[in-house]
């Protein structure tokens, strides 16, 4: 069973999910702490949040490398240097390659109920489709776009007056709480993956043991 004490969190934007993890891990009983924050771009609020919390940061920009494979290797090496038990992709808008995915468990959070509306515009796509309920998904990353085994989901109703920004803010309120809860439980209780089925701790899933 895997455990997740040391977290490397990857961000590309405002980093409110990162902030929720930083806040939670201020309490040692949470069981996990953010040991580094990585980004694919400079000048974002997520990096400023890490610096304010005195957490080391690194930036690996795709355009600084000749090939995607070079960038994949570089970001994996940077992540590895912090010896994480778990990598959390929290609003990191790049697909991680095999060098990272083969070396570490990677948890990802997405603002829609997968497998519906994967990709960079989950909130916009759900609204355009006219769904009445959407939500957020915490999953283990694999090589696809938001296709990995699902760890947890929570629903958020769509209101008739919602625009993308309003709906995303309401989803993020739920998403932050869910992510903090799941990361903490994974750290404290461990988890197992069997095919697409993720179990935290000793959940039997109803099977006799
Ligand atoms: C979150 O809603 C996250 O699910 C989404 O970006 C937002 C980041 O917010 N990620 C994706 O859409 C990835 N497909 P934050 O920077 O405030 O944590």
Image (spheres, grey):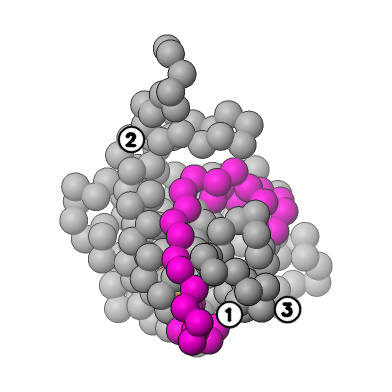
Q: What element carries label 2?
A: helix
Name the foreground residue: 166 vs 151. 166
Name the foreground residue: 51 vs 192. 192
Query: Which picture quadrant has residue 36?
Result: bottom left
Image quarter in which the C terminus is found? top left
Q: What stretch is highlighted in magenta?
A: 139-168
Position of 91 compared to 183: left or right? right
Residue at left 18%, top 56%?
27
- The crowd level at tag 2 (other Cα within 10 Å; few <14, some 14-19, many 20+) is some
- Give the labeled residue for mark 1: 41
Residue at left 63%, top 74%?
130
Residue at left 58%, top 80%?
41
Q: Is mark 1 on a helix, strand or loop?
A: loop
Q: In this view, does 168 lie above or below 112?
A: below
Earlier in the chain: of badge 1 and badge 3, it is 1
Residue sitting at the far top: 209
- Give the labeled residue for mark 3: 63
Name the foreground residue: 190 vs 151. 151
Earlier in the chain: of badge 1 and badge 2, it is 1
Position of 24 compared to 85: left or right? left
Q: Do the residues labelled 1 and 3 touch (CB within 8 Å)?
A: no
């Amino acid at each position: 069973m895997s455990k997740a004490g040391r977290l490397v969190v990857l961000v590309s934007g405002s980093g409110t999910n990162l902030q929720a993890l930083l806040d939670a891990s201020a309490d040692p009983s949470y069981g996990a702490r953010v040991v580094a924050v990585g980004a694919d771009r400079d000048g974002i609020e997520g990096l400023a949040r890490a610096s304010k919390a005195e957490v080391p940061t690194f930036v690996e920009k795709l355009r600084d490398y000749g090939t995607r494979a070079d960038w994949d290797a570089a970001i994996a090496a940077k992540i590895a240097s912090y010896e994480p038990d778990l990598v959390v992709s929290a609003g990191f808008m790049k697909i991680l390659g095999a060098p990272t995915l083969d070396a570490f468990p990677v948890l990802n959070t997405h603002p829609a109920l997968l497998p519906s509306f994967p990709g960079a515009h989950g909130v916009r796509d759900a609204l355009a489709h006219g769904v009445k309920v959407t939500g957020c998904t915490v999953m283990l990353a694999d090589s696809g776009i938001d296709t990995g085994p699902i760890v947890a989901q929570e629903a958020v109703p769509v209101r008739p007056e919602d625009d993308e920004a309003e709906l995303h803010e309401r989803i993020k309120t739920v998403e932050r709480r869910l992510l903090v809860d799941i990361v903490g439980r994974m750290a404290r209780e461990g988890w197992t993956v069997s095919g697409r089925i993720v179990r935290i701790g000793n959940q039997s899933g109803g099977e006799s043991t």
